[in-house]
Image (cartoon, rainbow, N blue to C red):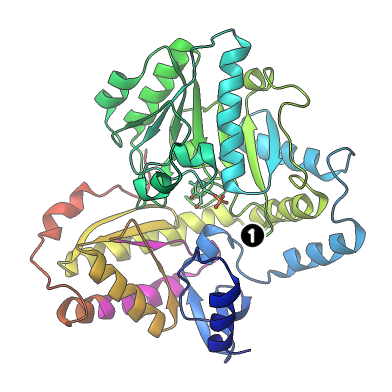
Amino acid sequence: MSLSSVKKAEEKHVLHTYDRLPVLLTHGKGVYLYDEDGKKYLDFLSGIGVMALGYSHPAITKVIKEQAGKLVHCSNLFYTEYPSALAQKLTKFSGLDRAFFSNSGTEAWEGALKIARVVASSKGLTKRTKFLALENSFHGRTMGSMATTFTEKYRKPFAPVMPGVTFVKFDDVEDLKKKFDDDVCAICIEPVQGEGGVHPVSPEFLNTARELTQKTGALLLLDEIQCGLGRTGKMFAFQHYDVKPDVVTLAKPLASGLPLGAILVTEEVAGAVHPGMHGTTFGGGPLACAVALEVLKVFEEEKILGHVKKVGGHFFKLLQKLGTRHDCVLDVRGLGLMAGLELESAEIAKAVQKAMLERKIIINRTHETVLRFLPPLIVTKEQVETVVEALDQVLSSCASSGEAAPVKKCGCRQRLPKTSVNGAK
Ligand SMILES: Cc1ncc(COP(=O)(O)O)c(C=O)c1O
């Protein structure tokens, strides 16, 4: 199979929802992906934050093989040993009390929205149906998730979306206070916005959201589908703050590439949920849960959190230095191994991404102008340095070549101190 024949077949038979990069991947090992010609790519995207332990991790591969030979699926009508074991681990790490397992991020978030509604209705608060979400949020593509997602292009073609969602200006405490009232059943926050351009929320904003919701009994829903499970250097991004949420959603890295999401809730919230209210055929199946258990075991054995703090801190410093060297870099943001470089224009960001791919380095562009880095959490200091060196060269040539829009002096050196520093507290 060649790239051109696969491309042709996709054009004819696959619903066109993705603009794929022109690479045909065949396998991966560690932090590297390989194409059909055996060319090796240094991967700083990890399948959009999924392959936290890298590709073909021996312990994960072993569990997939073993469990596939034992039991892949049997439905949620029966017990298997895995969901409770996984829930026990996730609740221990998070300080929440119970878990529900889904198949994807959007499903986890959709379930969280349903739970917020059911908590209000169980108290007889029938008017308490409103959600506050943030500008530039991303929570997924199903109807409720999409309704709480800010970017209009995701919602508009499918209108009318679920009503009752009000967007609050990102990190604007006054706007949050102004828009919060007794009819709000939940405030929805990604502690570090991912698709929106890698923006960590401030402690002040998160604290205010917690205080407001506590006053009325509304819920604080945190979406950690992208920023959770070690990505920021703590198991949960909210652990950088002094806040305990009512509900947290997880997905991407949970089962190392197998589809699995989770909703974690407090005991109080769990009290409003009863059998038959919510469910899924595949969610929490033995294969995905057995793999997720192994993921968490490897996290502990390989001391992934400490590694993320160390390598993430190094990466962030190098990116900041890079920002001071290139006028087209407007901002550097991040936490742990979730980092973003905001560039002056979408054209430059596109050109940089393309030039990096030509150098066999995979990075991502989100929110038009932001280069996003979500490497596997096992990435080394040397690999981080390789990427920053390549970026340094590429930024110089993209900014001066005709490929990108002409670069104006943007005064990034003045703007850099505004940067969200690696460590919210
Ligand atoms: C914060 C956040 N929430 C929800 C989702 C949706 O997850 P999924 O694509 O698994 O449905 C994503 C996906 O990028 C995300 O980043």
Magenta residues span 370-394
Residue at x 57%, y 45% (from the top left corner): 106
Residue 380 in magenta?
yes
Q: Is residue 68 left or right of residue 147?
A: right
Q: Within 10 Å of the Cα at label 1, are there few (<14), some (14-19), or many (20+) other Cα atoms?
A: few
Q: Quadrant of residue 364?
A: bottom left
Please tell me in which quadrant of the rendered image residue 188 appears.
top left
| Quadrant into which the C terminus falls | top left
Which residue in the structure is indicated by mark 1?
302
Residue at x 38%, y 61% (from the top left corner)? 372
Give percent across and percent down for residue 196. Answer: 36, 49
Q: Is residue 376 visible?
A: no
Q: How many marks?
A: 1
- Relative to residue 240, is residue 421 drawn left or right? left
The residue under label 1 is which amino acid type? Glu
**Depth check, front residue: 348 or 416:** 348
Residue 74 position, x and y percent, is 88, 48
